[in-house]
């Protein structure tokens, strides 16, 4: 099978030297990519900036912004049987990126940034990108984990949502372990805290099961 995986954060420019981003390390997405390649699948890894080594045997597509990631996914998803959207994509970007560095003003104590929504990659996969394969999203939540994950499952027309509580330091963005709940139309399947490498194999097994049923 061909599996497209998104990973890492996105970086949204404010001016030539500053940007907006998030705490995603990319570890979960890269673990998925490595596991899928080890299992013998073709892997297309679309990744924002990380400090991680690219797994052997994958087609690596580096991107920076949410717009970059949207375009890359739209271009590659048509080749995939399974799409796993593990990236932490920015929900907002600058309405207009400053051409020059924004200088600190001596007579101004606050600075207002005008932000606009980024394009919804996961939510666009079905209708805008015409993806008909198995679609898996991630829900990184700080509250109402199952409720928010189930809402996302329905709104984004996914086959599976991988939900995790990112408010916990021991399983947060930079941790080596995770504790997840697999949310589908059939119900919820909690998975105990384990390494992201182990959980990657479990997620892939579930994804392949959904793709071949």
Image (cartoon, rainbow, N blue to C red):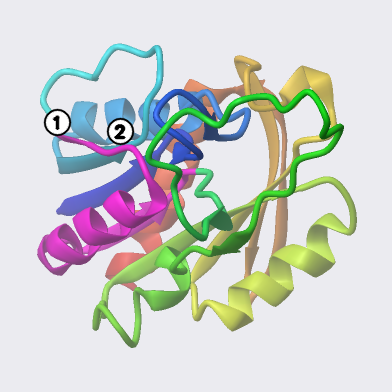
Q: Does residue 49 sit above or below 132 in this rendering?
A: above
* Residue 208 rendering spot, x and y as whole percentages: 33, 56
Q: Which residue is located at x 72 percent, y 62 percent?
A: 188
**Which disc is residue 58 wearing?**
1
* Residue 162 rendering spot, x and y as whole percentages: 60, 52
- Tell whether label 2 touches label 1 (CB within 8 Å): yes
Give the image quarter of residue 130.
bottom left
Q: Give the range drawn in magenta.
A: 60-87
In this view, which residue lies farthest toward the front?
107
- Left or right of 141? Residue 66 is left
Which residue does the numbered mark 2 point to in the structure image? 33
Packing grade of label 1 (10 A; few <14, some 14-19, many >=20) is some
In this view, which residue lies farthest toward the bottom?
127
Q: Which of marks 1 and 2 is nearer the N terminus?
A: 2
Q: Does residue 33 sit above or below 114 in this rendering?
A: above
Task: Identify the element where label 1 is drawn.
Answer: loop
Q: Which residue is located at x 39 percent, y 29 percent?
A: 16
Front position in the image: 7 or 195: 7
Label tally: 2
């Amino acid at each position: 099978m061909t599996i497209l995986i998104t990973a890492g954060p996105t970086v949204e420019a404010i001016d030539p030297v500053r940007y907006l981003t998030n705490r995603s390390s990319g570890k979960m997405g890269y673990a998925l990519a490595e596991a899928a390649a080890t299992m013998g699948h073709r892997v297309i890894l679309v990744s924002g900036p990380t400090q991680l080594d690219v797994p052997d045997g994958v087609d690596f597509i580096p991107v920076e912004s949410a717009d970059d990631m949207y375009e890359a996914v739209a271009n590659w998803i048509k080749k995939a049987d399974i799409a796993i959207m593990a990236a932490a994509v920015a929900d907002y970007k600058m309405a207009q990126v400053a051409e020059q560095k924004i200088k600190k003003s001596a007579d101004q104590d606050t600075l207002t940034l005008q932000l606009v929504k980024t394009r919804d990659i996961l939510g666009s996969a079905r209708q805008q990108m015409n993806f008909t394969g198995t679609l898996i999203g991630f829900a990184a939540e700080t509250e109402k984990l199952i409720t928010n994950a189930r809402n996302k499952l329905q709104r984004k027309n996914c086959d599976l949502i991988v939900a995790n509580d990112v408010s916990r330091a021991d399983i947060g963005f930079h941790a080596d372990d995770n504790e997840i709940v697999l949310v589908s139309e059939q119900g919820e399947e909690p998975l105990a805290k384990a390494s992201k490498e182990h959980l990657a194999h479990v997620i892939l097994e579930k994804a392949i099961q959904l793709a071949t049923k």
